[in-house]
Amino acid sequence: MMLAGGATETEILNAFVAKYGERILAAPKPQGFNLLAYVLPMVALAAGLVVIAFTLRWHRPQRVEPNAVPPEEIPEQLKTRFEAELAGFDAPRRARR
């Protein structure tokens, strides 16, 4: 009816806002309290990304440097004892076969 009367889109929108309030608009004007509808999702997204980044960083496995002694530094006496103990573990397996 208003469109047929020659009213522009802006005039029609202003008439509806005057009658029903700004909640009638799909996207309220970004001013005052309505600005929260534009800013809050971005703030929530940024906060979520920060929480995810800290969580991933906190749960990342720590790199542990090995404390192994190079084989050339192991005394011969210890090598012999180690081989003897390993042979003792292998003996019961051989007996079962």
Image (cartoon, grey):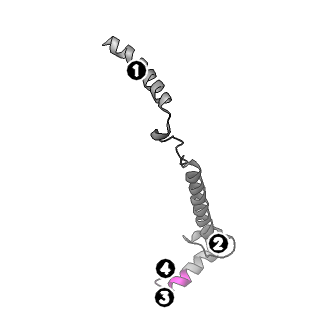
Q: Which residue is mark 1?
A: 87
Residue 26, quarter of picture: bottom right
As for residue 4 lying within the magenta part, the answer is yes
Of badges 4 and 1, nearer the viewer stands: 1
Q: Residues under labels 3 and 4: Cα distance? A: 9 Å
Q: Where 16 sits versus 56, above or below? A: below
Which amino acid, mark 2? Leu
Residue drawn at x 36%, y 16% is 93
Q: Where 73 sits versus 79, above or below? A: below
| Local crowd size for mark 3, using a 10 Å CA cut-off: few (<14), some (14–19), many (≥20) | few
Q: Where 95 sits versus 43, above or below? A: above
Dot placed on the residue nearer the N-terminal end, 3 or 4: 4
Does the magenta stretch mainly form a helix, a strand or a loop? loop
Q: Which residue is mark 3?
A: 6
Q: Residues under labels 2 and 3: Cα distance? A: 32 Å
**In screen coordinates, is 87 left or right of 13?**
left
Q: Which residue is mark 4?
A: 1
- Magenta residues span 1-12
Which amino acid, mark 4? Met
Q: Which mark is residue 35?
A: 2
**Mark 4: secondary structure:** loop
Closer to us: 33 or 8: 33
CB contact under 8 Å: marks 4 and 1: no
Q: Residues under labels 1 and 3: Cα distance? A: 102 Å
Residue 86, quarter of picture: top left
| Local crowd size for mark 4, using a 10 Å CA cut-off: few (<14), some (14–19), many (≥20) | few
Which amino acid, mark 1? Ala
Of badges 1 and 2, nearer the viewer stands: 1
Dot placed on the residue nearer the N-terminal end, 1 or 2: 2
Q: Position of residue 91 (x, y in %)?
A: 38, 15
Dot placed on the residue nearer the N-terminal end, 4 or 1: 4
